Image (cartoon, rainbow, N blue to C red):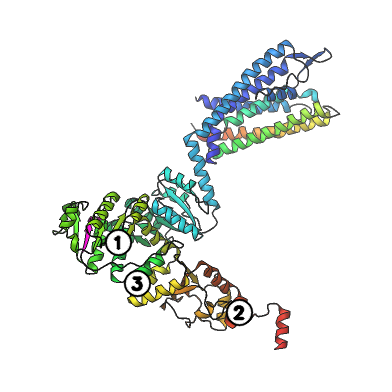
Amino acid sequence: MNLEKVVFGFFIILALTLNFGFFLGEIDNPEHHNVYELFAAIVVNLIATVLKFGDRTQTGALLLATSLVAVLQLFAAAAVWAYAVNISATGLDGMMMASIVSLAGGAMLANVISVVLLIADTVNLRR
Amino acid sequence: MDKVLFLFLRRMRAPLLVLMAAYSISITGLVLIPGVDDQGEAWRMDFFHAFYFVTYTAPTIGFGEIPYAFTEAQRMWAALTIYMSVIAWLYAIGRILGLVQDATFRLAVSQQAFDRSIRRLSAPFFIVCGYGDTGDLLVRALLRRRKRVVVIDINQDRITDLALSDMDYHVPGLCADASSSARLRSAGLHNPFCQGVVALTDSDDVNLKIAITVKLLNPELPVICRAESLDTERNMQSFGTEHVINPFETFGDRLALALHSPGHHLLHQWLSSVPGSDLPMPLYPPRGRWILCGYGRFGKAVHQGLRREGVTTVIIEEDPEGTGCSSDCVRGRGTEADTLQQAGIDGAVGIVAGTNHDTNNLSILMTAHELNPDLFVVGRQNKDDNGALFAAGHVDLVMRHSEILAEAVLAHLTSPLLPLFLKLARERDDDWANELVSRIGAVTDDRVPELWTVPLTADAAPALLQRLRHGTLSLGQLLVDPGRRDQQIPCVALLLQRGDGSEKLVTPDDEVPLHPGDRILFSGQSSAVSRINRALRNAHHLEFLITGKDQPQGAIWRHIAQRGA
């Protein structure tokens, strides 16, 4: 067993699961989506991105790309949230929540691809 | 992936992780710890404000407690945040600074910059391997002729010299072993703009390896090599190296030429010196007995040249057995008066100081000059730095290694017709050479004239080819001075080679008709280059040169002119 692989897999899968947890629930209901979960998803996604730095293989490049997409989407979601709470006149209403969750949904898709790539790579190793 | 970016990302992995951990722990704490707002009610910081607080606290900017004054619990956490995040930043910045100074990283950066400048080259260029005295002379001369150059040298100091030197164009320099094929490839061996490779390094082996590499990887590309032993020279020629230049033999040959015919020697000097430098003076080496000090590679080449001209020589050599010197040589260095007297300096007419040691050469020349002031003195200068010393001594002819090499390479690279012309010129007599020298002297000021080749092709001479389709044109008509039609522009046509190679006319007359595909070698002032080019490209200008009349250019004026006639 390789500790590096454990840590690497842990963060990539945790990024997906947290993202999924935030995404779950009615899309426009703020009650169903926890801001702490979004924060945790962003942090874990960032860590996963940095862990993917410096891998020169084709799979490595693709993994990094999916992580960058996920981080970008989650940042956008967080920015919308901050705008809704602090700047917008209407506050965190259903429309705002829906756009936050759909952005997080996009990030989740990228995370799913990331995990699929990780599994495909592991299966290909055959050892 | 990009090499520099890859290195950066790999090294920055740990600092970035530490930074992220510090930020996320700080933000989480700030959000979780309860606070009090300005109304005294319970309040919790949201993520936006927590992120804002950490963002300005971590780089020690510190805007204060925003949006409400902190409680004691929040202040405790804020203190922890400051220590954590500031240390994380210091660590990250330290790593970045360390990385920037790291030798591997700098090498990667410089290689990437070099690769980029090669990719961006969009003009014909040459690869010069070895940037010593010769390389420097050659690069400058090529740049003056608007050719681009890429330099490879194994010595970092020389590449630094190159970067510091004042050049008209940017010359990309790579510090690498030029005999490695990967390095040659990265210097642009496969670039479509690459016009040739020049191998000038000190080592014959390296030059040989370069020649083989180029001939195998890109056989179309011409290679010019420096070779100092006959063995290497033959080896290089065996696989099709275009030109092999042996500086010693070149000089021995020149000296023999000067003895044989001063006119030819002067012509040779004028045409092969670097354009724009001072015009060399004519030399009249005397016939009689010569003394030759040093019988190494240089001495052997000079000896051969002198013997070909029937001049008797006495050799002074420190190690006659080791150098394979004939039995009747004087043993010694030649720096002492008695050795020179033993060699018969009183009755000699010339002396060649040809050891590979500049100080000894100068000492020989000074001693010889004292013993016999009428001697014709030839000195071999090995290092460029000693130029001032040789100029101060009474030396009639100085053999500068670097200059001879650079001139020979330059002639091959920029005017391929010149070697052919010089070969054909040797068949003529001394009077012919003297006459040509005075003709060239008349069109140039006291600087070495420019030398250029004009090809009559569709690219270079569209107007002239159009004219030749329904008429004839002689060389003289092309060279008419448009301002004063009874005169010619300041240049001399040295050689006209027909496109099919059937005819090679040395110093063609004004009446010689021009044919499409001809190549003409000119020598003269640099202003003549653009004037001839104008006649080749501009039909109206060419028409004016032939008829002396300004033809109407527009359709209406042409119509009016025809009606009027």
Up the image or down, B374 lies above or below B337; here it is below
Q: Which residue is mark 3?
A: B263
Q: Secondary structure at mark 3?
A: helix
The type of residue carrying mark 3 is Gly
Q: Helix, strand, or loop for circle 2?
A: helix
Say whether disc 2 or disc 1 marks the residue closer to the N-terminus. 1
Q: Which residues are magenta?
A: B286-296
- x, y (%) of residue B455? 50, 71
- How far separated are the C-alphas under marks 3 and 2? 38 Å
B272 or B122, nearer to the observer: B272
The lab-note entry on whether marks 2 and 1 share a chain reads yes
Q: Chain of mark 1?
A: B
Displayed quadrant of residue B505: bottom left
Q: Tell me where residue B269 appears, x and y as whole percent.
A: 38, 66
Q: Chain of mark 2?
A: B
* Residue carrying label 2: B544
Rendered-image quadrant of the N terminus of chain B: top right
> Can residue B458 be spotted in the picture?
no
Asked if the residues shown at circle 3 and circle 2 are in contact, with their CB atoms under 8 angstroms apart, the answer is no
B524 and B234: which is toward the camera: B524
**Whether residue B187 is situated above or below residue B420 in the rendered picture:** above
Q: Which label was assigned to residue B249?
A: 1
Tell me which label, 1 or 3, sits earlier in the chain: 1
The local crowd at label 2, few if under 14, some if 14 to 19, many if 20 or more residues have their Cα within 10 Å, is some
Q: Is residue B233 visible?
A: yes
User: Comparing marks 2 and 1, which lies closer to the viewer?
Assistant: 2
